[in-house]
Amino acid sequence: MTRLRTVACLLPLAALTLAQSPAPQVFGYRDFAQQAKWDKVFMAVPDAALAGQHLKTLTAAPHWASSPEDYATAVYVADKFKAAGLETQIIPYKVLLTKPVKIVIEAFDADGKKLMSGPTPEHVDPNKFGGDPFQDDPRILPAFNGSSPSGDVTAEVIYANYGTLADFQQLAKLGISVKGKIVLVRYGENFRGIKTYIAQQYGAVGVLIYSDPADDGYFRGDIYPRGPYRPETAVQRGSIQFLPIYPGDPTTPGVASTPDLPDSKRIPIDKLQNNQPTIPTNPLSYHDAAPILKALGGAESPRDWQGALPFTYHLGATGTLGAGGNLGAGGTHSTPPKITVHMHLEQDVALRTIWDVTGTIDGTDPAQKEDWVVAGNHRDAWVYGAVDPNSGTAAMLETVHGLGELLKQGWKPQRRIVICSWDAEEEGLIGSTEWAEQHETHLAHAVAYFNTDVGVAGPNFDAAAVPSLKQFVREVTKEVASPKGGTVYEQWKADQATAPTRRSRKPIESTDSDVHIGTLGSGSDYTPFIQHLGVPSTDIGSEGPYGVYHSVFDNYNWFTKFADPTFVYEQQQARVFGLEILHMADADVLPYDYQLYGKEIVGYLEAAQKQATTKNLTLDFTAAQAAASRFAAAGAAIRAAQSAPPSNPAALNQSLREAEGALLNPEGLPKRSWYKHTIYAPGEFTGYAAVVIPGVNEGIDAPDAPRAQSQLAALAAALNRSAAILESANKEAAK
Amino acid sequence: MTRLRTVACLLPLAALTLAQSPAPQVFGYRDFAQQAKWDKVFMAVPDAALAGQHLKTLTAAPHWASSPEDYATAVYVADKFKAAGLETQIIPYKVLLTKPVKIVIEAFDADGKKLMSGPTPEHVDPNKFGGDPFQDDPRILPAFNGSSPSGDVTAEVIYANYGTLADFQQLAKLGISVKGKIVLVRYGENFRGIKTYIAQQYGAVGVLIYSDPADDGYFRGDIYPRGPYRPETAVQRGSIQFLPIYPGDPTTPGVASTPDLPDSKRIPIDKLQNNQPTIPTNPLSYHDAAPILKALGGAESPRDWQGALPFTYHLGATGTLGAGGNLGAGGTHSTPPKITVHMHLEQDVALRTIWDVTGTIDGTDPAQKEDWVVAGNHRDAWVYGAVDPNSGTAAMLETVHGLGELLKQGWKPQRRIVICSWDAEEEGLIGSTEWAEQHETHLAHAVAYFNTDVGVAGPNFDAAAVPSLKQFVREVTKEVASPKGGTVYEQWKADQATAPTRRSRKPIESTDSDVHIGTLGSGSDYTPFIQHLGVPSTDIGSEGPYGVYHSVFDNYNWFTKFADPTFVYEQQQARVFGLEILHMADADVLPYDYQLYGKEIVGYLEAAQKQATTKNLTLDFTAAQAAASRFAAAGAAIRAAQSAPPSNPAALNQSLREAEGALLNPEGLPKRSWYKHTIYAPGEFTGYAAVVIPGVNEGIDAPDAPRAQSQLAALAAALNRSAAILESANKEAAK
């Protein structure tokens, strides 16, 4: 743990003349001119080559959370924070992590002949297309799924497509049971932990998750090292923690896993079923999955379950369809051959030390210096993590570099800035969750959390945000130049126009015609901030044809060939991230747009009501709709007040911040009380993707009318609380 | 050539009591009751087991047009016609056919190493899933494309997706020239001859057309003999004649190729470029295409050009994209390796004798006995042709069986019925075209041509028809029981509701909400009738998962495993086909629906006008629209007259028939004067698929405003001619 006080120094005024065009009007500022000057000073600093150096250093070795190499990256980040003048801490937590000791996956045909024996090490031909210089490091852990229990099972195999709830339901409808079976599913469509969550509920005894070439392999484009897509042996690692129940250290939901936390305050390891799977689960490459899948008999899979491997996919059982499967005229197969898989996983599940790094710049405004602006990115990686997450880390260090330069020139933020480098995000958002749980009181009046995870995977900027910050993100991107020419905003808009379906972060609703901004689901560190504590959040990054996610090949070689060879998108990312921080730290009035927020919620309720009708549920939406309309009206009114801010906006700002907090329901969601937000949560059956007004929508989907009705009431109460805060601030402002 | 007079005999009246429910009102009949009785008698006759026997006999050997085995099938069919009491003829024509002598396809990599040497014989493992009992017959011709010239070329290869006009245009846009290259394209999307037609215009020196597993192989479902889809070595043969220019014997457009036709009346073989390709073209299995495609370097293909082979498809050249192709962030490949293909084709192109078979039943109505009802199906096959075409032939023979029974019971049709078994359809609709050209004068007052080609490929009935006969087809299918329960009509409707996109014969417009009926394009024997002579036509059949089209495996073994094991769909087909004939032969008033026809034409014009606007063409649609409205109004009026027919409907019937004939433009279409119909033609760049109001639409697509405008005038003139005939008949009826 180290601390370093900022040493400020002045720079010649010349640096401020960078502002060449008249400063635009920016929401939240009485007069943007001064901020525009600081923005220009800031933007001149982030350096592409330096970002490249950070990336190269951070990704020189595999740095799985809690490893010595992970600690070395913490020290590197802390040094950069300190060098920029931030008050820096390396903060350890003691958390439950799974480490693989032995992984054996074998498959046998009906005669006991071995079909495959794995897992095959991740490897590409060193003599073709330049090979890969990182693949042979002995510190690489075997590919595994974090949170999978140990196990030794042998069972027949059923193919279950993406392992979504709909997929398992369809199998059941076809009369095919997965009870006592090992389920083979492909990556995609939902968070991988959900695949196991559902398989387990359906009685499966093991899960194998493979990467189909249809989803991120040769079907998408050339494979590494010829191109950016997943090669034959590459495996997607990843946590299968039941993230939608709660994230963070599984033993301490709601409590920070500080090193001194007594064991008595932790849930014992054998009582973690709520959050930890009970059936062994392991990832596979398609090299290892193909022989199993090819040997499966039984009914043909539904045709939209077919991937890009060169044979017809079968389910492994005939079910009620009969052996002919779903052929138009029937086939003539007999009982499918019995294909069995043997999975033997030995996991070392233990409390391990991880290290967050924080760097703080104190705020100067006495009324608001405790209103933290938090920005973060995780640092730990499954292997090298060039894209995920260290493209974000490298950019963030250049953001910090820019903040340091501002500090040197005498700038101070009104609000406190806290820059965070999270650890053990990959295992379940652990570093961020423990820190957020530790700082719950402070964060109750944090004004924003800005996240980045995959900072740069390619040239296409994209973002997700709470609706109150959508316009804020757009304004920031209008100030930053794109390497493609024009501004980031313009390129973002053009990209959405030409490739509207490519974005991974789709909005649930689009109530305005501007650039679409995604809805925050989960799968990254904003979750504890927005969904547990109600801190308005955004998540930004730049996307591309990224096929090596969570494999050995997400490394510096891949990055410099396919993502950002000259690090100019790193520079862009550092600038956008930095401007988010600067504007939120110094805006006169908090630039939240509750008008748009209100409109979107009204839309969510309309969609939910339609869905309820489809499901033949009789629900009374009157009170919730009235509350949403009231909230939307109050949002529209306060927007006017924000545009003409009072000379002392402290009270207004406090109300604006409290309005988001009021959307939390202290009881949390049914079955998962850690999630408090009434508008956003990761879906119980999606994981990554958000479910909006989750209590209501999941009640409808169940379907469970009484639950949905009581969640409508909880939503109405939250919206009325929030609207009342905004209304009273409106009255105050009108005086 | 043989003749046999029908010997009529009476059957007990009991057979007529089959009509149990009250006869429905059927359009065209004053009183349907008597017809309903005959329908029942007829429908009791077609026999599933007999259809199976016909099929087994017809497909016992490969019977390529002009072969001795083909002649044997003609004799079989003629015998069945005679046995039923039809006046029967075997009619020879002497026509130009291509027969392969030697086919060599080889590919080499940049070092001259052989990548493949083919073509590989079509073969499946005899020890798996029952093997195939037909694959080793020495009479099987090597897989080839009819109408391909001989040639011996060696050139580099470019992949051009489906070889559509849009595909070649996209290559050009990417800066990739096919000049001097061999183009590798996949089957699908257009008629195969069009692939060569366009490739040739773009300067290619050869074309290889392969079957991608994405289109009819393992990606669709299990491959033969496990399932119905195309196995690895199976090849799609087929003609590449330029069908949209004119079909039939290439040497005699517009003239019948009777055996005595002097050579001076034929176009010399070296002057056939208008209709015959000049560059060698051959089909390939994916077994033979994969090594070539896999070796291709250069830019990645556009992602929607990717098929289901297990590698990323490349174009074979870099073009202006650079070596990285269409990757988001660019790749680093150098010049693509030089993959060359050697094609050596020796074709024996000669005049050969083919044999149509016709069977006639004279009409009894003195006024209408020359108003022929023609029904036909082709008999020749690329190899065994179990589905294509002999599933249609077997059913047609059972239709004839039923007609024979009616004759025995004393029934006689009002109009003359002519049943036709065409030869050399596969080479370019030759048997039907020559016969139609020979009988042009008679056919000018033929009242209908009913086609079937693929009679049964599976259980899903479907149809295409000229709009005036759509309701007619629907009414017929309401009378026939489906093996699935209910009527054919009900099952057809249910099938469309559950699988709306499966149908291969999609309608261009759907102006009514009833069962959709496709638009007649080309690729089967209705073309000379509707598009050259203006005989109202329909085309019916029953579809399924038919992946072995034009391969060795379209044989009796495949058919009885996957299409119709108990021949009940054969029976259904025989019944529907028979009722079409019976109703058209005996209706009091011709059951044409010019109201619907008019509505559809109004819709075609609206769509064309939109397309013209999109293309920024200034065209005057006023006259054509006025003519279409006039035609539609006259059509609606005459429908009322048809519903209350005069006691002597001869004049009305004559007008109804003439109204279709008036839609012909004696000048024909630009560049292809053989096609006379102003409303329907195969598209110049589609082949199979219809282009509606083709002169206008192809003028717009070119784009060529003067041509489009003059075609609008020709269309308006045709519609006005036809409307005038209907109006005058209306006036007559109102008297």
Image (cartoon, coloured by chain):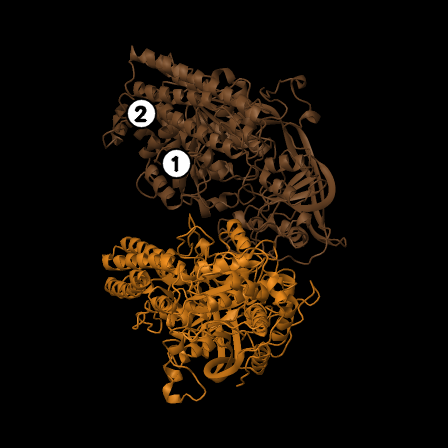
Chain colours: A orange, B brown
Please give the label number shown on residue B27. Answer: 2
Quick one: B373 or A689, which is closer to the camera? A689
Residue sitting nearer the eye, B81 or A279: A279
Residue at mark 2 shares a chain with residue at mark 1: yes
Q: Quadrant of the C terminus of chain B?
A: top left
Residue B723 picture location, percent across and down: 41, 17
Spatial separation of the CA atoms under disc 2 and disc 1: 19 Å
Residue type at mark 2 is: Phe
Q: Is residue B533 visible?
A: no
Q: Nearer the viewer, residue A361 or B142?
A: A361
Residue neighbourhood size for the residue with mark 1, other residues' Cα within 10 Å, grouped as few (<14), some (14–19), many (≥20): many
Q: Position of residue B613 (x, y in %)?
A: 50, 32
Dot 1 lies on which element? Answer: loop
Q: Chain of mark 1?
A: B
**Mark before the other along the chain sequence, 2 or 1:** 2
The residue wearing badge 1 is B516
How many numbered circles does the render carry? 2
The reply, left or right, for residue B77 in relation to residue A556 is left
